[in-house]
Every structure is written in structure tokens, then in C-alpha cells.
Amino acid sequence: MQGRRPTHPRHSILVVDDDESVRESLNELLTPAGVEVWTASSAAAAMQTLETRLPCLAIIAALMPEMSGLSLFRKVRACRRTAHLPVILTTAFSERLDLHDPLVDEAVDFIKKPLDLDEARFRIRAQLRWHETSAAREATNQIMAAIDRAAMDAIVVIDDRGMVVHWSAAAESMFGYTRDEIVGKDLYPHLPFNRCCKDQRGDPESLRDTEPSKLNGKVIKLVAVRKSGDRFPVEMSVSEVQIEGRCCTIGIVRDCTDIRRIENELAFQNSLLSTQQEVSPDGILTVRTSGEILSFNQQFKRMWGIDDGVLAAGSDEKAIEAVLDKVMDPQAFREKVWG
């Protein structure tokens, strides 16, 4: 820990010991490394400090006059605010701890007295690194929880055995299963996703029969089943990720019920428009502003006697050129059409 440039403290440690030399030694050891050190000479003073401050680690002498370090440790654990505070106990060779006390097992480490500063540095550094990792993990969890709450699409994570390890709030709403009902369970008996494509027998292909690596980075169309038994269309983007050494699959699932309904309505409207266009007594030609022919009806082709090849070329210019010899004033017709 020595040799690091002191900056604003990233860590804070509460040292509780009735021995002033121990408090001073740990303060001199930790402060140059950029650690903010708070000291207390008694358990009562430590409790006052903890009422307004919350360190990332406490180093407590196991035996002290009036209230022992173990009694202080017990109070720390009983308080909701400090219940998860990691504690290192310091103890002399001559001091006997009740090893049957379950509280002793809750200490994250022990430091012998008289202090060996190298040993103390090593043990404290290990706990500070654990604190950094834990804090980073907690920050990530908070970000993920915020994303989880805000996401409209369902977020589902399964491990390499197909067991659900994450089930978002949107997944609860979409599928009807609560987290308690499905986390830790096999996904596929609860949600028999079927791909929209068919297998060789003509049956819908089960997602379970598809190797996850073949889906990585893709968006696939599926038919899902709610807890109620209702089937509905979804689109799912799939990604593989390593979580704690295990290969997991993340699925972002979007309910496409409304999208499919709108697509079907548009398809119906287009079919209706196409039918109306074909039965119209007028010749109809639809052209983009770029000059590309979008559609035409048979009456238009018959009316102007245009060859199929001309219309198939998709160019309004060729179509207009093909009818110029059929109008009385080609130049005026040209100007009217093209301005």
C-alpha cells in the first residue's frame, strides 16, 4: 500500500482499540495510502461515530474494557444501517476468544497483536480490494435494476442448462409468470417458444432444439405462450455472455401482437386498394416522385396499348414515350406530365 500517491480518500476505515499505540500505528500505515482513518478508543465512542458515518471497513479490538469488541460487533450486526459492515478483529496471543460464538465466524479476518505491519497491510488491502469489487458489483446491479424497471421489452437470462437466472419486470407482465415462479426453473417447459420456421416434418421448430451459438447476435421471430395459454408473436434478439465463468444467453423479447395486427390491417388495405384499382373503369398509373413506377392497373395498359416489357422496366419516362404517338399534341402532353 506504500508508494501510492495519496488522493482524495476512496476508502474509509474505523479503527476501534483502547490501545493508543495500535490506533496510531494503523493510522500511520493507512493514511499515506489514501485511506481516511477514523479512530475510537472505546466501543461507546465507536457507536457515536457510526451514527453519522459509515466506513467501508471496521478494525475492532476483540477485548476492551467496559464493552468488549465482540459486544460492539454484535451491536453493529443488530443495526440495519451497519449490518453488512465488514469487520476485522484484532486479538493478542494471550486473549482467548469463544470460538463457539457464531459472531466470531462473521469476522472477515483477524489481525494478531502486537501488530505486524506487513501482515496488517496485506490483510487490510485484501479487504479493501474486496470492497472495491463489491462496490463495483453493487453499482452494476443498480444500473441493471434501473434498466430492468425502465425497459418495455422483456429481459430473460438463462444459463447453459436452460435455467432462468434473470427475469425482468417486463417479462412478468408479458408472460404472466412472477420471478419467484420461474427463476431457477427450466425455461422451456414454462415457455415453449417455437420458431416461425418449420422443421423437416413441417412442424414449428422449438427454440430449445436450436444451438444458442447459432442465434448469437441475431433477431429471430417466435411464437410464445403466456401462462394463460395464449399464443402470441414475439421478436427476440439473442446474445451470449460469460457470467461468473458460465455461458449464459440473454434474450430481449418484444411482444409483436400490435405490430402484427397493424401489418395485417395494412396488408388488407393494400389488397382492397389493389382490387379497387383493378375494377376501376379508369386507367391508373402510380409513380414515385423519382420517376419509378409503383403500380398500374390492366385498364391503363389496355387504354394505352403499352407492351408489358415497357411497364415491367419500371420507368415512367419509357411509359410516357410509348404513348406519345397516341396523343394529339405530344409536346403539350410532355409539359403537362413533367412540368
Image: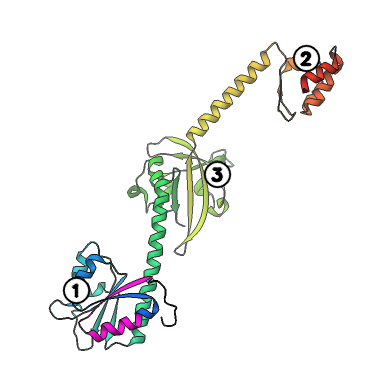
Q: Residues within 10 Å of mark 3 (few under 14, many from 20)?
A: some
Question: Start and end of the magenta stretch?
Answer: 1-30
Q: Residues within 10 Å of mark 2 (few under 14, many from 20)?
A: few
Query: Would residue 194 be found to the left or right of residue 93 on screen?
Result: right
* Identity, as a three-letter code, of the amino acid under mark 1: Ala
How far separated are the C-alphas under marks 2 and 1?
101 Å
Quadrant for the C terminus in the image: top right
Of the image marks 2 and 3, the number of the one nearer the N terminus: 3
Nearest to viewer (mark 2 / mark 3): 2
How far separated are the C-alphas under marks 2 and 3?
45 Å
Query: Would residue 87 be found to the left or right of residue 32 on screen?
Result: left
Between 89 and 34, the residue placed more toward the observer is 34
Decide: is 278 above or below 44.
above
CB-based contact (under 8 Å), mark 2 and mark 1: no
Residue denoted by label 2:
302
Residue 276 position by quadrant: top right
Decide: is 127 above or below 220.
below
Q: Residue at x 46, y 40 (%)?
A: 224
Q: Is 26 included in the stretch rendered in magenta?
A: yes
Residue denoted by label 3:
220
Q: Is 67 included in the stretch rendered in magenta?
A: no
Of the image marks 2 and 1, the number of the one nearer the N terminus: 1
